[in-house]
Amino acid sequence: MTQYTIPAEGLVAKPAHELAAMIQSGEVTSREVTQAFLDRIAEVDGELGAFLHVGAEEALAAADKVDEQVKNGETPASALAGVPLALKDLLVTTDAPTTAASKMLEGYMSPYDATVVSKLRAAGIPILGKTNLDEFAMGSSTENSAYKPTKNPHDLERVPGGSGGGTAAALASGEAPLGIGTDTGGSIRQPASLTGTVGVKPTYGGVSRYGVIACASSLDQVGPCANNVLDTALLHEIIGGHDEFDATSVDREVASCADAARGGLRRPCRRDNRPREAVRAPRHPRRREGSHRRRLRAAGAPGRNCRRGGLPKLRGCYGRVLPHPDL
């Protein structure tokens, strides 16, 4: 019986940072690692539907470049050099079709790479292929792809979330150790939650959107995905940073997320590993509300009574903002 979640052993069971260390030490080659994930894709993706396109030749060629650098004793291009990645099919690439999971773009080949893709290539990261999504990133289950639905590796009767369910499913099934997604209203975070993986929507402007097919430009953000926090942080350091081709890109040094990930929780903890703040009895919501109101009034803020609109109205608000990103 085929197991669709990450196998317990083998190269595909190891986290990206461990694979990178093994590659740099010469214990394994990037080609061996990349081929292991390509074999895993061939084994399970016919049922899962995580990938729309697999670029085996291109991925292995990129892996060979890393192996040559290791052989020559060159400094690694990045902390994840040689470790392959699954790319959401919303970022344009010169060596693979970009469809946004739509038949309207079937076979489209971009004349340029997205900035994030260029950074991945410069970091020595082989791209395994392009992953499935809800068409033009408009959906939350990856059932709305024009090509096929993607299934959740933990239960094939359930969805992996969306719109980036293809990347999340690839990670959760051991088809890739790293992934790139995009997030407008939860398209990285929600699939990560449904598949038990890790995904981050960076601060707007922290990662270039150049070469990303837009869902809503004022909300979209490219982000890193992986199976643990450290790998996600390392990947963010590679893709983050200013880009002159993106006017909304922030011209600021990328903070070391990896250091924070390695440091972990530094607040005092109980033996059950929960922070002390988490086990204190919470204050009643009305008590907290009253405290906040008193502070605001003391600061001179005028008080106004209002009714909460409720979730249905919030959904309506999002539905109006999404198609009008320039407002």
Image: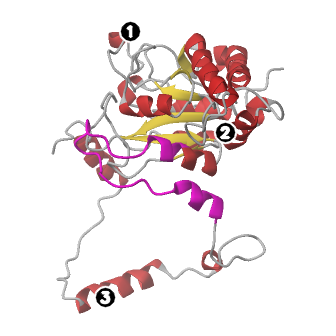
Q: Amino acid at mark 2?
A: Ala
Above-or-below relation of 286 to 307: below
Residue 190 visible to an observer of this rendering: no
In the foreground, 46 or 131: 131
74 displayed left or right of 8: left
Question: In this figure, which colouring scheme has been used for the structure?
Answer: secondary structure
Residue 43 visible to an observer of this rendering: yes
Marker disc for residue 295? 3
Residue drawn at point x = 76 percent, y = 32 percent: 26
Q: Quadrant location of residue 326?
A: top left
- Distance (Cα) linking label 2 and label 3: 47 Å
Q: Quadrant of the C terminus?
A: top left
Q: Position of residue 34 (x, y in %)?
A: 67, 23
| Magenta residue check for 262 | yes
Q: In the image, which is nearer the foreground, mark 3 or mark 1?
A: 1
Q: Which residues are magenta?
A: 235-264
Q: Earlier in the sequence, mark 1 or mark 2?
A: 2
Residue drawn at point x = 80 percent, y = 32 percent: 27
Marker disc for residue 303? none
Q: Earlier in the sequence, mark 2 or mark 3?
A: 2
Q: Which residue lies under the disc numbered 2?
A: 16
Residue drawn at point x = 54 percent, y = 39 percent: 191
Q: Position of residue 111 (x, y in %)?
A: 32, 15
Q: Which residue lies under the disc numbered 1?
A: 106
88 displayed left or right of 210: right
Residue drawn at point x = 40 percent, y = 26 percent: 90
Q: Residues within 10 Å of mark 2 (few under 14, many from 20)?
A: many
Q: Earlier in the sequence, mark 3 or mark 1?
A: 1
Q: Residues within 10 Å of mark 3 (few under 14, many from 20)?
A: few
Q: Residues within 10 Å of mark 1 (few under 14, many from 20)?
A: some
